[in-house]
Amino acid sequence: MKKIAILGSTGSIGVNTLNVIRTFPKVFDVEILCTNTNIDLLEKQIDEFEPNYAVVNDKELCKELQDRVSKKICILCGQDGMIEAIQNADYDVLVAAMVGFSGLIPTIESIKRSKRIGLANKETLVAAGELVIELARKYQSEIIPIDSEHSAIFQCLVGEKSENIEKIILTASGGPFLNTPIEKLANVSVEEALKHPKWDMGNKITIDSATMINKGLEVIEAHYLFNLPLSKIDIVIHPQSVIHSMVKFYDGSVKAQLSLPDMRIPIQYALTYPDRLPSDFVQTDFTQVGSLTFFKPDRNKFECLQFAYDALQEGGLKPCIMNAANEIAVNKFLKKEIKFNQITYLIKEALNKIENGSASDLEQILQCDCKTREFVNNIKI
Amino acid sequence: MKKIAILGSTGSIGVNTLNVIRTFPKVFDVEILCTNTNIDLLEKQIDEFEPNYAVVNDKELCKELQDRVSKKICILCGQDGMIEAIQNADYDVLVAAMVGFSGLIPTIESIKRSKRIGLANKETLVAAGELVIELARKYQSEIIPIDSEHSAIFQCLVGEKSENIEKIILTASGGPFLNTPIEKLANVSVEEALKHPKWDMGNKITIDSATMINKGLEVIEAHYLFNLPLSKIDIVIHPQSVIHSMVKFYDGSVKAQLSLPDMRIPIQYALTYPDRLPSDFVQTDFTQVGSLTFFKPDRNKFECLQFAYDALQEGGLKPCIMNAANEIAVNKFLKKEIKFNQITYLIKEALNKIENGSASDLEQILQCDCKTREFVNNIKI
């Protein structure tokens, strides 16, 4: 039995991870489940999967759950509780599916135990890529990406030498505003931004897809995961989201990984790699997919995409600043405190005004994250 | 230095193999060159690549070449000469790029020397797949496919377990008559049939693409190369020929290999596998490829496709009969002795009238090939 710890079990990736686990009761066992605030769903998940640990980040809700659950299970509260579970529980794979920067510290703790990380939380690598990859190497912890694009590249690279890569090509659906004129972006509503054309995901990543900063974050993630310079990472708009990404080798051959959009495929692969398990996920019938198309991304319209390239180019704390500013800005947009195009403005302000520095230790990264959040929260719109 | 023997060096694959070799003078060296009748081109190739052996299948033309060439080189004549070269020369990889059944015996001789075979000659596996694969296993000879479809599948399977394959999907351009109504097929000209929309290839394979028996031959080739039952081999029409083929794994993930059509890519891969070498082949820019589309093949219109499935299903000598009948029929069509749709008729006659038998030894296969050729040659149209 492979024992699985899921950070963010009530989110979209977490729920899909449990869908995979439910299909293979003789292969996988759940060891840790964890939520930020959704204790109702967590309670149901505890009932069904009987983990040894559950963690609720919100301390009051945590107490409420402790009162409700009578099973023999260790329910821990807050960030400290989460670290305690990660340090003590008996698991093989950590699925890091929390939202944003909050995934960083728990992921590092799991890396220090040399566990396999199924990484859905790209912000971990954006904010602290150098540090995380260095620790993973030191502790021989395997990081298997769950993001569909990075899983695609990982799968295309199986059995290949990474020095033979000419380029990797991240595909992007283009999000809900691919065909919206730039001058109309100011007034799009939260509801419109949350209507992703291809993927059903959490709110944060869906807004990130609408601004296309998500693809920028993925470029940074790919840079660290595959140890490639920016010049070897391309983006192509592929509205059908059937090709999840591609690797171009320097002999002219290109490999791609494809499927109808279904996050269970990369999740399951991260759990089973280097093997695969049979699934009843919807099979891709190519005679039904219609035509597959590809376009250049519009970097004028989607400025956030460029921010990511620039931040990685400058290095140091810049990606951390960009990430923190984006988290606050997206949150403000979701609460309807700012307009859609002001997300870009807030990130730009943070990138321009906050001083860069070294990102080689965790303390510096945490401080920078904190400072950026405060800075963006105080910008008057 | 890797030493290369090329059977069929004056054909399309042979010339492209030499194009690859020319790019890497410090990596590859030519040991054997060989032609059926094109001694003018062979003479130029000898001048440039200075092999130790050259073979001309046509004995008179062979003598002419012997008179012309003054270099220190062993020029051998006919099938016997070819076997002698294959048995005695010092080479690492045999590129089997002869046309049709004639590639069988030389390929077997090279397998017996445990050489790597870069296999472009699919008829070898169609006529004698069981025998050839068995010999390759026995003599530990690696067969690396050069057909773009099979190279694609081979590349997609690197690092993967073959028991995880759900299906392989061979893509087919559909040839020049993809959109020609069935009732017009009777009267298409040789010139029209030779106009392949995507690939610049030899005459035989181009006509095979027009009847789509080429895809049928590829199904049989794939069956033997990848040890898969017919039920796991699908065909999809993909007119752009950018995706060269795909593998669907049983977890729902699909891997594809892509590039603009350029035979140098699979040829070079067969020479360099498991490594790759940098090339200046045209790079595939996905923002320029337009849209990629997929359709079901029309098995009523392209009956030859069905013949291949049926022949493999029946087994024994049936694929050999189909192959021999097709070679004669294509030849007749190229000489304008029969109409395009009579190719199908001749193959059907041979498959219906010639008795099946075991294909486990070479003698039986050679006899069957011979008998079928005679039978088809004697059919009155």
Image (spheres, coloured by chain):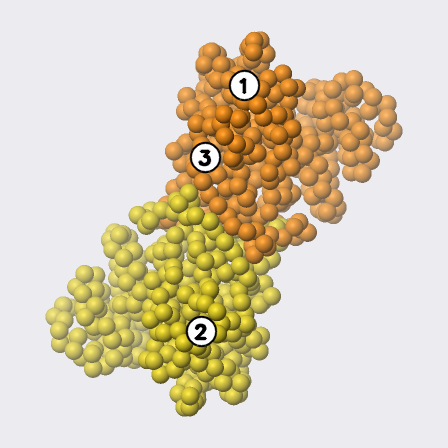
Chain colours: A yellow, B orange
For disc 3, the marked residue is B297
Q: Is residue A295 left or right of residue A122?
A: right
Q: Is residue B77 above or below residue B194?
A: above
Crowding around mark 2 (Cα neighbors within 10 Å: few <14, some 14 to 19, many 20+) is some
Q: Position of residue B104 (x, y in %)?
A: 59, 24
Horizontal relation, residue B6 to residue B70: left or right = left
Q: Residues within 10 Å of mark 3 (few under 14, many from 20)?
A: some
Q: Chain of mark 2?
A: A
Residue A131 in percent (x, y) is at 48, 75
Q: Amino acid at mark 3?
A: Pro
Disc 1: CA contacts within 10 A as few (<14), some (14-19) or many (>=20): some
Amino acid type at circle 1 is Gln
Residue sitting at 50 percent across and 14 percent down? B350
Q: Nearer the viewer, mark 1 or mark 2?
A: 2
Number of callouts: 3
Disc 1 to disc 3, C-alpha distance: 20 Å
Residue that numbered label 1 is attached to: B342
Label 2, on which residue?
Answer: A185
Residue at image position (66%, 19%) is: B335
From mark 2 to mark 3, how far is it between C-alphas?
Answer: 44 Å
Judge by depth and name the residue closer to the eye, B125 or B281: B281
- Asked if labels 1 and 3 share a chain, the reply is yes
Point out which mark residue A352 bears.
none
Residue B67 appears in which quarter of the rendering?
top right
